[in-house]
Image (cartoon, rainbow, N blue to C red):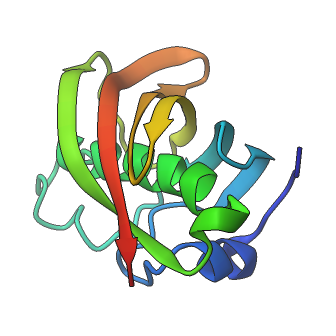
Amino acid sequence: MTTSLGRAEIEQILPHRDPFLLLDEVVELEPGARVVARKLVREDEWYLAGHFPGRPIMPGVLIVEAMAQTGAVAVLADDANRGKLALFAGIDDVRFKRIVEPGDELELICELERVRGPIGRGKATATVDGQLAARGTLTFAVTEL
């Protein structure tokens, strides 16, 4: 198990870059199995100016993307998948339970359930201060970059 990866180390695993890299740090990593990451929602995030003026809220689709990037770290940190790309193949049973706003820190957890060849599934959650913000099952396909 690896712990505490900063953005530079995350960028060695994921192909995402600013402004679309939605993870600040990885605090736990078991390649091919489980990952825990964090994302601090700052007041100057690019998407908050228009979502919504006067009531900034992190869009649900970006919470799902942050969960997916978290899962992609677990998948792509595995030696067999280094240098590859993890693409969405499905998003199931996603539910949003709490608004995420500036100042909130998301804790993102993804546990891989099944990986068969290039296709896999993982259960992901996003919480703020222990309160569930979103959850879902993510299916991915690993391909060449």
Q: Is residue 140 above or below residue 130?
A: below
Q: Residue at 78%, 47% (x, y): give it.
A: 27
In this view, the residue in front, 100 or 79, is: 79
Q: Work out whether residue 137 can be spotted.
A: yes
- Where does residue 9 sit, x and y in percent of width and height? 74, 76
In this view, the residue in front, 104 or 94, is: 94
Q: Which quarter of the image is occupied by the N terminus?
A: top right
Q: Work out whether residue 56 can be spotted.
A: no
Q: Quadrant of residue 86?
A: bottom left
Q: Residue at 47%, 60% (x, y): give it.
A: 42
Left/right placement of residue 43 relative to residue 108 reads left
Q: Residue at 15%, 51% (x, y): give it.
A: 54
Left/right placement of residue 40 relative to residue 117 reads right
Q: Is residue 125 above or below residue 68?
A: above
In this view, the residue in front, 106 or 72, is: 72
Q: Is residue 14 above or below residue 41?
A: below
Left/right placement of residue 132 relative to residue 143 reads right
- Where does residue 100 sit, x and y in percent of width and height? 35, 36
Number of marks in the rendered image: 0
Q: Quadrant of residue 79?
A: bottom right
Left/right placement of residue 28 relative to residue 112 reads right
In this view, the residue in front, 32 or 117, is: 117
- Where does residue 19 sit, x and y in percent of width and height? 37, 80
Q: Residue at 39%, 84% (x, y): give it.
A: 145
- Where does residue 135 sit, x and y in percent of width and height? 36, 22
Q: Quadrant of residue 55?
A: top left
